[in-house]
Amino acid sequence: MCAYYYTCIVSLIICVTIYGCCTKRDCIGTDDLNWIVFRDFSAEELDSIKIYETGVLMLPGIVVDSMEIYNNPATYGIDPVKRILLPKGISLQYHYKVVLLSTGAVYLISDFEAIQDNCNTGFLCFDFYERLASYRVNGVKQNFAEIVIKR
């Protein structure tokens, strides 16, 4: 009988440990910036994009890396919002120049700021993560947890 109670208590502790903490589920952190959200753009405008990654502290303004996205099948979303999945995640250590090749439009993304935040707090859960607090697009401050470019 005592072994039965012991097994129940151990099982309860295991369940609380596994399911009580959130393990950062459904929280978009700075390490999850794998897409750019475009608002009020047509699919034709977004079918060819070039993104330049430039240095900030070391080699400011010098292109460090670039990504090209052509006829992107990963464009999804209903108008007016489209998400473009990137082959490489956004790093807060760099600035980005996004060029829509079909229109020639240029968007400069810079000055990233991140903060520590709670994620799915619950019973016995004290999980924190770093999320994007703000950034600038063409000099205008944006306060979103993901990268959003508006027309």
Image (cartoon, rainbow, N blue to C red):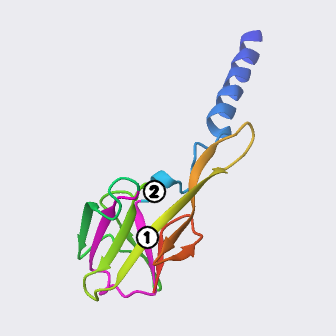
Find the magenta span and give its range: 34-56
Give the vertical position of 30 relative to 109 (above or below).
Answer: above
**Residue positioned 47% across, 85% down in the render:** 80
Image mark for residue 150: none
**Residue positioned 66% across, 32% down in the render:** 17
Image mark for residue 109: 1
Horizontally, is 18 left or right of 80 in the view? right
**Residue positioned 39% across, 78% down in the render:** 107
Horizontally, is 127 left or right of 52 in the view? right
Q: Is residue 55 magenta?
A: yes
Horizontally, is 92 left or right of 47 in the view? right
Q: Please name the amino acid that badge 2 sits on.
A: Leu
Between the C-alphas of marks 1 and 2, the distance is 10 Å
Residue 46: x %, y % from top left: 32, 81
Q: Please name the amino acid that badge 1 sits on.
A: Ile
Most extreme residue toward the top, as rendered?
2
Quadrant location of the C terminus in the rendered image: bottom left
Q: Element type at marker 2?
A: loop
**Residue positioned 58% across, 47% down in the render:** 24
Residue that numbered label 2 is attached to: 92
Q: Element type at marker 1?
A: strand
Nearer to me, 121 or 33: 33
